[in-house]
Image: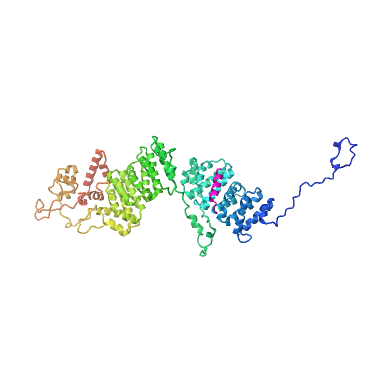
Amino acid sequence: MEIENDVTTANGFDDVIPSSIKSDFNVAEHAQPESDDLSGKPLSNRLVATAPAVRKAAYLELAAILGGESGPPDAEAAAEHADHIPRLLADRAPICHEGALDATIAWLEYVSPEAVVGVAGAVAKALMEKHAPGKYQPKAIAALLSLLRRGGAEPVQSALEAGVRSKAPKTCAAALKASAEALLECGAAAFDASPHLKQLPALLQHRDKSVREEAAALVGAMRLCLGDGVLAQLKGAPEDRINALREAPLPEPRAPLETDPSSTATDPTDTGAGPPAGAAAAAAPHVAMPPLDLLAKLPRSKGSKEPADAWEKQTLSDKWSERKAAADLVASLLEGQSSLKPADHGLVLRPLKRLYQDANVNVAASAIKATGSLARVLGPGFRSLAQQAAPALVKRGADKKAVVAEAVRGCLAALSTASCLTLAEAAELALAAMSRSTNTQLRSTAARWLAAAVSAADAEGVGRALDALDAPLQLLEEDATAEVRALGLEAAAAVGRKLPSEAAVAWVCRMPPKRAERVGKALGGGSGGGAAAAAPPKRPSGEAASLKAPAAAPARAPSAAPARPASMTAPSQVRPPARQASQPSVGGGRSSGAAADGAKKGGAPRREKASSGGGGGAGEERWREPDLPSSDDLPPALESEDLPPAAVRSAMADASWSARAQALGEVAAQAAGGGADALSPLRA
């Protein structure tokens, strides 16, 4: 070292100017890298090179080879480099990540499922933990989906479940997004998202916005693929959040991707016109939830061998809220389900059936709704249980509470629409219930059930059930209440519309005349089936014409009508029933007691035989009393002539004697109000 100035003349070393010091030591500030040119080395060597840039280039070269960019795809090369893929994905150098993902996607495109099995676990874990939360998330998710389709379903499922449980928000959000994509792309048959249901209520309320959004997106995908029943399984989620998810639009359906690349070959007959083949698959419904083990889902006592025993005890609780919760639990578990595992579901129906008669209407309604849900899922498998439940349901249909009445009607309709009961069986059960009770509400429920059962049956099923339907329908049509009669006619009209035209005409023709007329009019107002062709039958010319209520009495020729007594022609002679009780009858000579006696026996009054004497006038033909309906045809005949009006008939059945007396007065006033010529024989 040389110093320009003599340090001895200076005051000290500190006074030396640094720039004046010269040194022979010369070292570069940055060390030059050792020459490592591996461009001529084999690809297998460059894939494990120490230099990140060399590895990146090797990864991209491998992706080009496997993807067919540098020649036809080589399946042997894909199998040869299978062991390198996990090491590529585990590379710590950020500049190598994209190349590693490209190579992985290309490798999964052509590798055989057998070669994937050995490395699927490591590949799925690396993709989920290292790459999905990072910068190249789309490529990482695409690689996961390719692995799922290539036989790595279980490793992918496990990796995504672990990711959803992760405490890191980025990892959790990425796992949720990948799960939604897997469900939409591959369908519920290939990817089971149900294990995420336990975490979703908490994730929907997560502090991180991205986690909340991806959780909501996964719920939307599950609704699209599995139905809205998944919302009922989000236990603990706020009600407003559930409502928002229910109202949110569903994601666009996608065609499930094929697992075999050869199946995606273009059809040579395809001209390019029309929608692509994937459009039909996209419109097709996705695979439903797997069969549910209902008894295993219901509460069970610890150590008990009896299934759902704790749930059954809950149905016997003294608190109505607990009984209702037990019934609601069954309905919530069945929501969205399409099938159940085979089991003795009578263990579920029997407690529910006991709740039909619960004093609390809300409990009864919940039990009835749960029964309807069970019937819809089981379908024909619920037949034996449906025959047990239907009589109790119809009996409960007598309840006037709207919440119970609506539940009963919905459940009975489900028994028919789900093919739990045939139309003939429904008709027999309805007839048995109506024969035991004249309750208006009960018969109204039975009529609506028959109408729903007829609508659910096909023409062949309706034809087979005609004999079974006649009795209950006629009972409804002749009911004392106008509402029930109207419902009965609607059900009868539904039967006629289901039948072919010829069968409908034949069915109407075999009815009694008055009933045929009513049903024919009801059919005339409908459409379809035999509605247009069915008409009320005409009686043969040899039979007595049925009684009709003319809108206006037509003018009759003097020779066309037989002579009548004065009491039948003079309006002033028509007396109220109270005065006529002691007067002779219009038939001439018969006392009111004889008429009353005939009425008590349930038949029509006896007609007096024609005679040449007895006040008829010498040489004059004695007037004959017209044919009156029998006791069986009397109610329809009275109804056809509006005798008395529906409101008056209702008042005559009132519990108050004053209301009944007033109704009788109105009947008398109506009978006395018209002219004699306008009176039909029945009115007279």
Report x, y in % for residue 328: 42, 41
Does 438 lie within the magenta span? no
Residue toward you, 77 or 52? 77
Q: Residue at (43%, 49%) from the top-left corner?
A: 339
Tally the marks.
0
Image quadrant assignment for residue 389: top left
Residue toward you, 248 or 310? 310
Report x, y in % for residue 499: 33, 57
Is any atom of residue 524 visible in this view?
A: no
Does 157 lie within the magenta span? yes
Report x, y in % for residue 239: 48, 41
Q: Residue at (18%, 45%) from the top-left corner?
A: 600
In this image, 585 relative to 193: left or right?
left
| Colour approach in the figure | rainbow
Is any atom of residue 592 visible in this view?
A: yes
Secondary structure mostly seen in magenta is helix
For the N terminus, the quadrant is top right
Q: Residue at (39%, 50%) from the top-left corner?
A: 379
Report x, y in % for residue 477: 28, 49
In this image, 427 relative to 221: left or right?
left
Image quadrant assignment for residue 348: top left
Q: Which residues are magenta?
A: 150-165
